[in-house]
Image: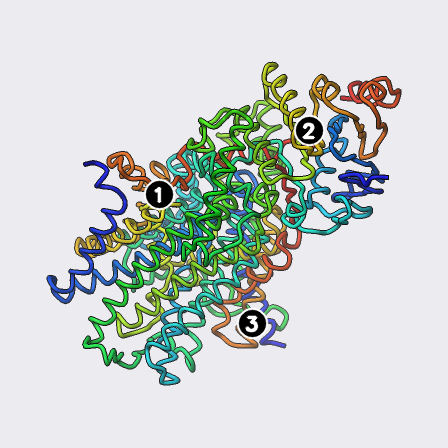
Amino acid sequence: MEYFSYLMATGISTGALYALVALGIVVIYKSTQVVNFAHGEMFMLGGYLGYTFHVMLGWPYLLSFLLAVGAGFVLGLAVDRVAFRPLMQRQTMVSVLLAMIGLSFVLKGVARWLWGGKGDYLSFPPLVSPTPISFGGIMVMSQQLVVLGAACLVMAAFAVFFKFTRAGRFMQATADNPKAAKLVGLRTDRVYMYTFAVGSAVAAAAAVLMAPLTLLYPDIGFALFIKAFAAAVLGGLTSIPGAVVGGFLIGIIEQLAAGYIHSSLQEVAAFVVIMLVLTFIPTGLFGQRRLRKV
Amino acid sequence: MRHLVGKRAFIVALFGALLLAPSVTNQYQTFVANLILLYIILSLGLNLLIGFAGQLALSNAAMYGIGAYGTGLMMAHFGFPYWAAAPCGALLAMGLGTLLALPALRLSGIYLALATLAFAQFTYWVMTHWTDVTFGAGGFVPPRIDFSPLPVNQEQGIYYLSWILALLLYVVARRAMESPVGRAFVAIRDGEVAAQSLGIDLLRYKSLAFAMSGFYAGVAGALYCGLLGFVGPESFDLLQMILHKGAVVLGGMGSVVGSVIGGTLLTVLVEITKEAKFSIEIAFGGLLVVFVLFQPSGLIVFIRKWLPGWDERLHYVPPGTAPPVQAARTAAAEGDD
Amino acid sequence: MVKPALAVRDLSVSFGGVTALQDVSADFPSGEIIGIIGPNGAGKTTLLNVICGMNPPDAGDVFLGEHRLNGMKPNRIAALGLRRTFQSSQLFAGMSVLENMMTGLHLMGSTGLFGAILRSRRMREEEREMRERALQSLDFVGFRHFADRPGSALSFGQQRIIEIARTLIFEPKVVLLDEPAVGLSVNRVAELDTLLRRIRDERGVTLIMIEHVIRLVMGVSDRVVVLNSGRKIAEGLPDEVRRDEAVIEAYLGHQAHA
């Protein structure tokens, strides 16, 4: 039982991070109809920037967190302006996807060049003391609790933003019905840009939260992207709450599979979920069926 | 005179040069020339699937690996001679590749891309972790290949075999695409629904596209096993996938000759970036972005302009004419009865 | 009693709780032009989608001559002699106009991949014949000079005409047209009118046409079917339908609510 609750606890805290990244993917997908293949790299760069501020420059964690989130926002703006928007206007879906794949590689290469090569794994100092605390019989790392708490805060902030701020409601409207949004006079281009930026900022937040728990390396962007995509697909690519649920589920499934069947399954659980979901329930748990119109 | 410098002349010149290469170049350069031949094959196959049939599948590197592993393992575990093991590898890649056609019927665009990517990552994981069979992350060295009674050693044998297969597979691709099969592929790419309304069976032709590209990648993999004399998972990772995509985009999606150009140039560019110690990731990722933004139809467009004797049936999507993503999306949002 | 070229019986379809078609029955006699009209959202395109196999019906039957089409895949239904056009242009952009037409002859090909690879004599003969027939088809609509242009280089109106020609090339029995006049100028609509009559008279094809351009539909159709909110509310000669109370109510009522 203890083992189970340990696995669950780990699964829930990593799941919270997957949920955050998946949120970014779903939000961008809902408004632009494109899955941002470079999203994982937004995450990765956010993490590296956080490292630069906190470890290399020695600034306090909270400050570094906020700066990294801000930088993620700006980076998202830049990527939208420079790559995403020109692509969307001119090219077919296949080309856009290929270009985003290319972009993700460019960003990964840049990170490798700036912060270290293939073998370099960067580590964050732990945020709080690494001794586990007992939660009514369940042993949890306090670091995990902090991460979980912070992730939930970010998700809550996100929900508030979408529901209660003007900008958020505009984004929601544009995502639900782009044509109507245009007719009503919303500058859809601008909205896409900010959606992109918000998605990236959230990914950066997730990275800085996760950094103390694990090691940073350039390929982590892709590794996380695949898991977050599995979460998004499981929840249904058009459903924001679905992304959150999916994230936690993936986190838990990973831990349980690794803990009870074989440790190497942790890497591969997400792939299997993607293949199974897309084959049997492509709309996921909460997504809507897309009607094809010609 | 300009008519002389057409497609045929180009192909003859290129393959002629490649045929002569081993006699005039050093061992390393011959190795690179052999790689060119492999990337020509890989690019040809992938173009059939992505460029002609429009199926964005990210599993080509995995098929390449399955071809290599299939061949090597048959030799290592069962003592097959190369001439029996190589077809096994190629056919295994073809079979597994064809299975991916099933999700392709229900998924498209990013869904298909990520489903095939998940499959590719899964394959990579199997290669790395199924140590009993695949020898794990460290890879393995298959037995030496004996080409007797032909008077060639392994290096020479693999080189000329690669040459023959590259040429053959080029001809096959040309002929297949300049036929009703080719038109069916392009119809599926440019208007799947209308294609069906004209009687084109999507399952059949998508399966065919996946099977052919799987076969091509499998053949290249079997040759790679012989070329390198070693099989290991790190040759078939994400970067490999980008290289394949790069070759197709560079040469021109939907152009068979473009694949030949793309495969050749890609190999040369990889060598150059290695020399300059410049990051391959930045170089080829950047290549994809730049080409998609500015010349998605590939270099073939420039070549067609400069060499008017170049007659190639139009099969790539002329730039600026395909419905951009946004327009397609708005159309989908239209109300309808 | 001669079997109609196409018949639907008690056809019902709904999507996610919304009823698109409810107990629709109609006969489409052979060799006639039948127009389908109705306000927006009436279910007209859904009806075409069900007939050609893109959507399976929840209940009811579709008959193409003697064949019951329920549940068949669209390419199979096409092989039985049904063709259709779509509201948006579906010319294949990456092919020449001629190749687009040759693709219309896809079902004629018998040599498959191996024939193509070996360039067998049969394959070359079939290619030649397809080319010939494609050129003839372009002649029928007077567009032979466009043969080698890319599909995407033509104007919208020209593309629509070529698409219609593409549906005819393999001598279908029934052709479904989804708003063929959309986006056409007045002159072009008149040309379309002439073309449709020629198709019916010279080729003996049954044309079933969704249209909003009332002038065209009433002018060229032999009979008209009216749908509203998923049900058939009227059927008959154009003049009869024009005066039918239910039809007037449907259009006016819809305007009042619009």
Q: What residue type is labelled 1?
A: Val
Q: What residue type is labelled 2?
A: Arg
Closest to the observer, A277 or C135: C135
Mark 3 and 1 residues: CB-CB less than 8 Å, in contact?
Answer: no
Residue A259 in percent (x, y) is at 54, 75
Cα–Cα gap, marks 1 and 2: 51 Å
Disc 1: which chain?
B
Q: Mark 1 points at which residue?
A: B289
Disc 3: which chain?
A
Q: Quadrant of residue A171?
A: top right
Quadrant the C terminus of chain A occupies? top right
Q: Can residue A170 be seen in this view?
A: no
| C90 is higher (above) or lower (below) than B45 | above
Cα–Cα gap, marks 3 and 2: 65 Å
Task: Point out the frontmost of discs 3 and 2.
Answer: 2
- Does residue C150 appear to the left or right of C57 in the view shown? left
- Label 2 crowd bin: few (<14), some (14–19), many (20+), radius 10 Å: some
| A132 is higher (above) or lower (below) than A279 | below
Disc 2: which chain?
C
Q: What residue type is labelled 3?
A: Ala
Q: In which quarter of the image is residue B39?
A: bottom left
Task: Point out the frontmost of discs 3 and 1.
Answer: 1
Q: For residue C200, which numbered disc appears in the image? A: 2
What residue appears at the point 38 percent right and 61 percent down from the top-left corner? B216
Residue C102 in percent (x, y) is at 50, 40
Cα–Cα gap, marks 3 and 1: 38 Å
Secondary structure beneath label 2? helix
- Does residue B156 appear to the left or right of A172 in the view shown? left
Residue C247 in percent (x, y) is at 84, 22
Q: For residue A257, which numbered disc appears in the image? A: 3
Secondary structure beneath label 1? helix
